[in-house]
Image: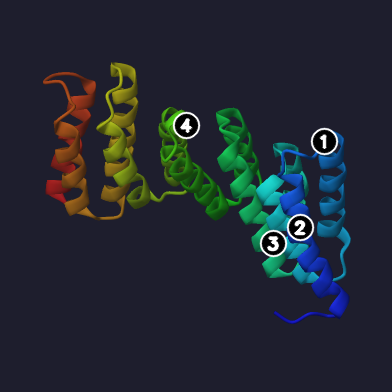
């Protein structure tokens, strides 16, 4: 990494010490707030992009969820790419450790509104993975996966949604949840048919067959989908 000045390198190293201090038990709440304010000022105003990117990383390690808006401004600003990338990575860290489904839903809406499709998929996938690895958040992980399915389908990326729905169908859930997941599976099959991928349509139908009742509108819809694929 190239430094604009020796002082910039010193400031970069100092941020590591700030990170350790802010995350320590000996620091009072007031001291932590002052440290976070200084980190925010470095992120927004330091002259060296390397120092700004390091500040973003440290904020990802220690900052509360209230810092997400500041980091998001950096992601969207006319910033150097490495600062934007570090700010975004910090956001993933903060949301991931928040254990908050409402917070994830809020940022899902924000990313949708700002047409950040790729980042929306990344946020949901990253959070689902993080939550699935911790006992206290495993139940939330499936909710994040459901949001990820919707995000894929919103963007027409049925191939990305398919394995997630298959995974969700294996979960021991109620009839309402199974029906919702079957509806997603039907949408995936219809999208695959529009793309002319008959083989994947039949895979969708086969996957659904294990969960469909013998009779009913959903069963009829999948039968119709299978016949349409055969006729094409």
* Mark positioned earlier in the residue sequence (3 or 4): 3
Residue 40: % across, % down? 83, 51
What residue does disc 4 label? Answer: 137
Apparent side of residue 114 relative to residue 48 in the rendered image (left or right): left
- Residue 155's place in the image compared with 1, above or below, is above
Q: Nearer the viewer, residue 157 or 26?
A: 26
Q: Quadrant of residue 129?
A: top left
Mark on residue 41? none
For the question of whether residue 108 can be seen, the reply is no
Residue identified by numbered label 3: 84
Foreground tag (3 vs 4): 4
Which numbered mark, 2 or 4, is in the foreground of this view? 2
Q: Which residue is mark 1?
A: 28
Assign a secondary structure to mark 4: helix
The foreground one among 30 and 214 is 30
In whole angstroms, how far apart are the C-alphas of marks 3 and 2?
23 Å
């Amino acid at each position: 990494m190239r430094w604009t000045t020796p002082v910039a390198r010193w400031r970069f190293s100092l941020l590591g010490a700030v990170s350790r201090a802010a995350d320590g038990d000996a620091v009072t709440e007031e001291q932590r707030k002052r440290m976070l304010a200084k980190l925010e000022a470095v992120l927004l105003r330091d002259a060296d992009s390397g120092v700004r990117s390091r500040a973003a990383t440290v904020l990802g390690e220690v900052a509360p969820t209230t810092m997400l808006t500041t980091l998001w401004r950096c992601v969207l600003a006319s910033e150097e790419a490495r600062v934007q990338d570090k700010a975004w990575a910090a956001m993933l860290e903060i949301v991931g450790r928040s254990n908050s489904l409402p917070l994830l839903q809020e940022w899902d809406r924000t990313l949708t509104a700002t047409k950040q499709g790729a980042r929306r998929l990344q946020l949901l996938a990253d959070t689902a993975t993080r939550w699935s690895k911790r006992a206290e958040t495993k139940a939330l992980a499936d909710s994040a996966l459901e949001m990820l399915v919707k995000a894929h389908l919103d963007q027409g990326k049925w191939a990305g949604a398919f394995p997630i729905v298959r995974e969700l169908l294996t979960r021991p859930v109620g009839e309402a949840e199974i029906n919702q997941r079957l509806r997603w599976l039907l949408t995936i099959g219809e999208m695959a048919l529009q793309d002319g991928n008959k083989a994947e349509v039949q895979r969708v139908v086969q996957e659904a067959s294990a969960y469909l009742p013998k009779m009913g509108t959903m069963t009829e819809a999948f039968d119709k989908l299978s016949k349409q694929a055969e006729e094409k």
